[in-house]
Image (cartoon, rainbow, N blue to C red):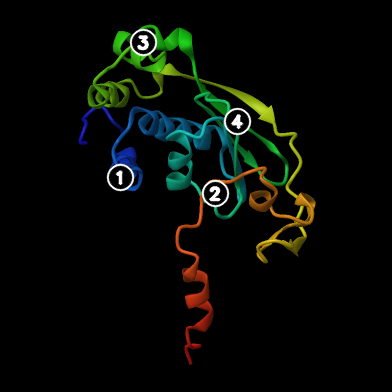
Amino acid sequence: MENPNCPKYLQPHLERGAEFHGYLSPGLVIGIFMVDLAKELLGPCDLIDAVVETRSCVPDAIQLMTSCTYGNGWMATKDWDKMALTLYDKEAREGVRVFVDLDKVKKYPLVHQWYMKFGDVDKDEVSRQLIDIGRDILSWQRVRVTHPRKAKRAFVVCSSCGETHPASDGELCQRCSGSDDYYEITDKGMVARQQVWPMVK
């Protein structure tokens, strides 16, 4: 989405973001501007960690523009549904929190309607407006991250399914204990077939 009001150096992130995310959502656009501002304010930093306060859209901007991903564990996610993120120095734990400032959003009626979820809006038009607006709806604060680093977990074998799981869950994994279950097995023979496949040499 070429836009003359968008800084040229951010244009590739918008294009890659649309491809990575599936489309250029308003939340992704905001996330790209948030990460850009946070990186600028943080300054040179060898090792960056991130905390993002929503599971929607914004995490993808962090993964696109920093070395922090779900997979490497350098991005913690809070399920708070807040359009906010923090980038911080992994060692010093000092960083910058950038967030969408509602008082600033109110200047833009369509964006405000989308942001507050006041009915349906044209998300493509919201994204276009957000690219024009850029950082104008963002505020920031210096922060020190206090949450502890994740300790490495020990694993044990579930006495029911035979798969490994964190020892802290007990003898049974979360699925077998009934505490968390997202699937039901529809083809029990698949496991047996996998077991008899020949080893690839």
The answer to whether residue 144 is left or right of residue 44 is right
Q: Earlier in the sequence, mark 4 or mark 2?
A: 2
Q: Earlier in the sequence, mark 1 or mark 2?
A: 1
Which residue shows up at 28% across the image and 39% down it? Answer: 23
Amino acid type, callout 3: Phe
The label number, if any, that marks residue 118 in the structure image: 3
Amino acid type, callout 2: Tyr
For label 1, the crowd category at 10 Å Cα-Cα, with few meaning under 14, some 14 to 19 and many 20 or more, is few
Question: Relative to 110, does residue 191 appear above or below in the rendering?
Answer: below
Q: Secondary structure at mark 3?
A: loop
Amino acid type, callout 4: Val
Residue where numbered disc 2 is placed: 70
Q: Earlier in the sequence, mark 4 or mark 1?
A: 1
Q: Secondary structure at mark 2?
A: loop
Residue where numbered disc 4 is placed: 96
Question: Relative to 171, does residue 142 appear above or below in the rendering?
Answer: above
Question: Relative to 187, does residue 137 appear above or below in the rendering?
Answer: above
